[in-house]
Amino acid sequence: MTYALEIDGLTKRFGDKTVVDDISFTVDEGEMFGFLGPNGSGKTTTIRVALDILRPDAGKIRLLDGLTAQQAMARVGYLPEERGLLRKEKVSSILRYLGQLRGLSKAEALDHGLELLHRVGLYEHRDKKVEGLSRGMTQLVQFVVSLIHNPDLIILDEPFSGLDPLNVQLMKEILGVEQKRGATVIFSTHILSDVEELCERVALIADSKMVLFGDLAEIKRSRGANAVTVEAPSHPESLPAGQRFAGRGGRVEYRLSDELTPEIILNAYADAGIVLSRFEQVLPSLNDIFIEEVSRVRQVN
């Protein structure tokens, strides 16, 4: 297996405070990978160290199957969480300049930049200054900048911030095209449903330490079902009402506990003579896992 990113024993301190504490994980070439954690967990610091913006205190980092950050930088696209475009400059001038910094000629940078502006629906704004754009438009321009040189590794920190649902979907579709092209996509976001939709593998850090790393489906299966979905024409009153969440088409979800197991639920319907059209155990969502793991770490600390 070749890796787009290898992080081995990474530690980063600011003074006496350790913000990244001996974390290790790998990202396979060609995958879409979710890098997660609550605010202040060390995600952005990890990304900045991986890109050689900050220097590590310990650990090794390799990009694109063994390169250092400096060697790989021409093949990496980065969308930072903070907006850093020059507000007094025109969008087209920024694309030309930043594309040249990534090794493109002036003509190549402008041509590819304008092509990407077409894809995100901002071509008509190419001669506007950044200060005249909305927050969402500015985010899309930075997204274009991260893709302008056809990078092999794309790292996005909170890429959907400030975007409406249509532009979020557009960005997802473009990332899917980039992945099919062969690029690796790593993104950090607080919108966990997007991670579930896009990523097969994830890493979760909390309070500077690695908490989870691996295949998301396997992580869910290892925790077992935490709910049962039932679809039926009616529902027995013997089951606790507080555990019921009404849905469409006679669908109800019961949260499981020691006092409410799948067997108890199934027997309650049988005793009431209610015929089920659906009975399905539901694995925990990434949101459930995130809350559980982060809460556990905070209780320990």
Image: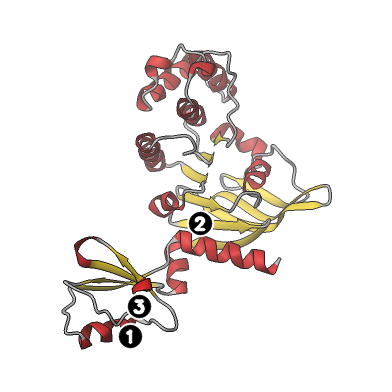
In the rendering, at what x and y percent does residue 34 appear? 50, 51
The type of residue carrying mark 2 is Val
First in sequence: mark 3 vs mark 2: 2
Query: Looking at the picture, how far across and down is residue 180, in whole percent?
Result: 37, 42
Tell which residue pokes out farthest to the top in this image. 127
Q: Nearer the viewer, residue 138 or 5?
A: 138
Q: CA distance from mark 3 to mark 2?
A: 35 Å
Give the distance between the C-alpha atoms of the residues marked 1 and 2, in whole angstroms. Answer: 34 Å
Q: Which residue is mark 1?
A: 264
Residues under labels 1 and 3: Cα distance?
11 Å
Instruction: Nearest to the eye among marks 1 and 3: give it.
Output: 3
Q: Which residue is mark 3?
A: 240
Label 1: how many residues lie within 10 Å, few (<14), some (14-19) or many (20+)? few
Q: What residue does disc 2 label?
A: 202
Horizontal relation, residue 122 to residue 67: left or right = left
218 or 66: nearer the eye? 218
Q: Depth-wise, is mark 3 or mark 2 nearer the camera? A: 3
